[in-house]
Image: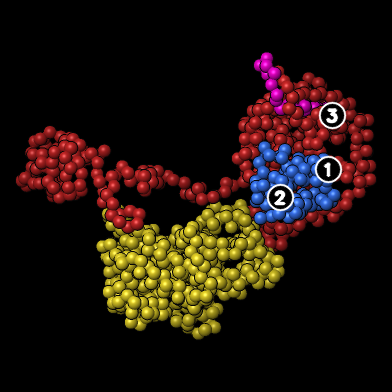
Amino acid sequence: MTTYREAIREAIRVAMTDDARVFLMGEDVGHYGGCYAVTKGLLDEFGEQRIRDTPLSESGFVGAGIGASIAGMRPIVEIMTVNFSMLALDQIVNNAATLRHMSGGQIGVPLVIRMATGAGKQLAAQHSHSLENWYASIPGIKVLAPATVTDARYMLAEALKDPDPVIIFEHVMLYNQEQELEPRQDDYNAFKASVARPGTDVTIITYGAGLSKALQVADQVSDKGMSVEVIDLRCLRPLDSEAIFSSVKKTGKVVIVDEAWLTGSLASEISAQISEHCLWSLDAPIQRVCTQEVPIPYPAHLEKAAIPQIENILQAVNFVSGTSP
Amino acid sequence: MKTLNMPSFGSDMDIGKVVEWVAKPGKAFTKGETLALIETAKGLIDMEAFEDGVIDTYLIDLDKEVPVGTPILSLKYEPLRRIVGDGDEKEIERNKLEEIEGKSISAQEAITAPLVETSIGSETPKDILGKTTHRASPAARVYAAEHGIDLDKVKGTGPLGSIVLKDLKVETTSNATSNQKGFDTKLMRKAIASVVSQSKKEIPHYYLAHTINIETLQIWLDAQNNQKTVEERLLIQAPILCAIKNALKKYPQFNGFYNNEEFIAQQQINLGVAISLRGGGLIAPAILDAGTLNPEQLMKRLKSISERAKQGGIKQSEVTRATITISNIGDRGVEVIYGVIFPPQVAILGVGKVQRIPVAVDNKVQINSMLTITLAADHRVTDGHDGAKLLNEIDKQLQKPEAL
Amino acid sequence: MLNNNEIIEVIQKSIQEVAPDVNALELNPEEDIRDDLDLDSMDFMNLIISVSKKTGVKIPESDYNQVQTLNAMVDYISSRI
């Protein structure tokens, strides 16, 4: 059994061992061992040149990462959490995502950015955002969201191979998640969705921390004879529309679980695509289970009430299937 | 063709002339090299290359004054420094770019491209949807249309009381308990006896038979089915029903009801399909409003009524509104069948078994697939001549299956 | 991989689905299924669909003559499963 944290650490280790161009930089990644202890021990193994503690300046070190990648390195930039990435938004959106286009193809930015994301640790309004949807709407970058230990282990290598910027979102509540690490399959594809649990009556589409909640709901309702299919998106940009439509056409009933605020969420985008492409297969209105539109509260019970919980997902599943709870 | 134009060396420069060519045609030049000497009002200025390339030809004469922007040089090929694939720099010729990056489209094409990308598995809207004033899910509407279910009569148990798929499937099985489940063979036999007796007593039947060469149809059908999934395959009944209803449009005197000494042709074509029930018994529910259906749609409807005829769920409207009946004994039976007209209809068509027999085609003997189709019709309404025309039209339709 | 007995079970289940009023166990394995059980072409097609789905073996129309009896159908499927 491996933890999500250990899987990521191993992924970074292997990447750095295999390719001298790879290095990691971010706040507290070196001496402190990483804010979430992901990079613990790596400084001792690889030294200060390759595990670089940066100053408190997201715009600065993301920019440096962009420059390093243009110059031929393969940097992994760790932004402590998505909350701080906003300080580097201009670098990410206006430089990393657009330099290939603006240079007429002369410059590429093979940068990997890792960020922790999400709520659940009572870190309150400014430190609990889920902004995957913002990044997933930007042309020029790819966005990954590993929800399992296996994906945490193998997605990084795929991201490093990509000649364009890739952002990997690690949900804070997943770091301690412990699962069997599956071996990497030959046809491993980080950029497609997967059917985490096959079913025939209702489809739940989710990513990141939503996956384990969706699977628990699926288990609960299977006792009542309802067969729920759970789709783990895995890649948020580009979205695996084919996988989504194929499941929706099978069940006709969809619940999308997304920890972002409801308005403008990825759930909204998926909802729009489903109504454009699968209208005649829908047997019920599409349900989005998202975070309440409030700044994330600090008290535990209010934080819990704001974020999608198993009860909310269950309610949505019952609604679309016309069953009473 | 890539050209280089008379450059502007200042916002106030409108014209210039090349006074000396420096780069020669056919010889490669690199970025930064001087290509030509240009005379402007400001004096003599070097025209610099911004990319590597090779000149093809000079496009203007020396010492000719031309406006800024006029093409003065054409280039042979332009290698492009580009980062591709695994992140290493590669020089690629511009004409190879399409291979790597795909065809580019013009701006106009980009503007007028369809709004919803139809390549990722989009669905085309169904032409016929179940209509109702109640809330019903799109999937339920499609199902209702395909199975001829009246949504106004269905109770919805979906979200907000809407009619959903499971309500339609429940509806048909509840009918079953009052309908077919353990149907009384004796009662059914009695009912059939009554109908056929009345028919033979009151309706003066005349009979016609016509053998149709369905070689073309069979070949078309096999080709169609090869491309379809198992569930979508067509039985030969589907194109035959299609041919029949097309022929009825031309000869409406076979599609209607005879009551009170008067025949009234019907606009709507409701094809009654005689289905034999295991254990004895016959039921002839109709495919309602078959006029606009294509073979695939007819196949779907045929499946639906067959299923419900045998397992329960035939609607009253389906058994009382057939405007003509088709009896298909060909399945497991014989070559020719003459039916008994179900009043108040005025005709019944019989479709026999497909036979592979030797026939004369272009003065040569060939083995072709043949089918004998018969007509039993009410002589009060039509004559043999009309009947022959109808059968010939069905034949004609079946010779062009792709147009069905 | 299914063995022959399991294949027979699958076929019988499919027959039961397509024609619930028929006793699939009474089927004579050497007789034409359609004659023995009085199935019409629609029933037979539904049977093929059901068996194909359950075993994953595709049966093109041109092969219908190879699956006319229970024994023939079992042989056909077991050689392709």
Where is residue B361 shown, x and y percent of the image?
A: 68, 18
- Subunit of label 3: B
**Relative to B89, is B101 on the left or the right?**
right
Relative to B233, is B378 above or below?
above
Q: Earlier in the sequence, mark 2 or mark 1?
A: 1
Quarter of the figure that contains the C terminus of chain A: bottom right
Per the image, label 1 sits on a secondary structure element best described as helix
Chain B drawn colour: red
Q: Is residue B364 magenta?
A: yes
Per the image, label 3 sits on a secondary structure element best described as loop
Read off the residue under disc 3. B338
Query: B177 or C11: nearer the eye?
Result: C11
Query: What residue sits 83% from the left and 46% below the top?
Result: C28
Where is residue B348 shown, x and y percent of the image?
A: 81, 31
- Subunit of label 2: C
Please state which of the two labelled residues, at mark 2 or mark 1, is closer to the viewer. 1
Measured in 3D between alpha carbons, the distance from the residue under mark 2 to the one under mark 1, in whole angstroms, is 19 Å
Q: Of the residues shown, which amino acid type is indicated by label 3?
A: Tyr
Chain C drawn colour: blue
Query: What residue sits 77% from the left and 27% below the top?
Result: B372
- Subunit of label 1: C
Read off the residue under disc 2. C50
Query: A61 or A182: nearer the eye?
Result: A182
Magenta-drawn segment:
B361-378
Query: What residue sits 57% from the left and 46% below the top?
Result: B124
Chain A drawn colour: yellow
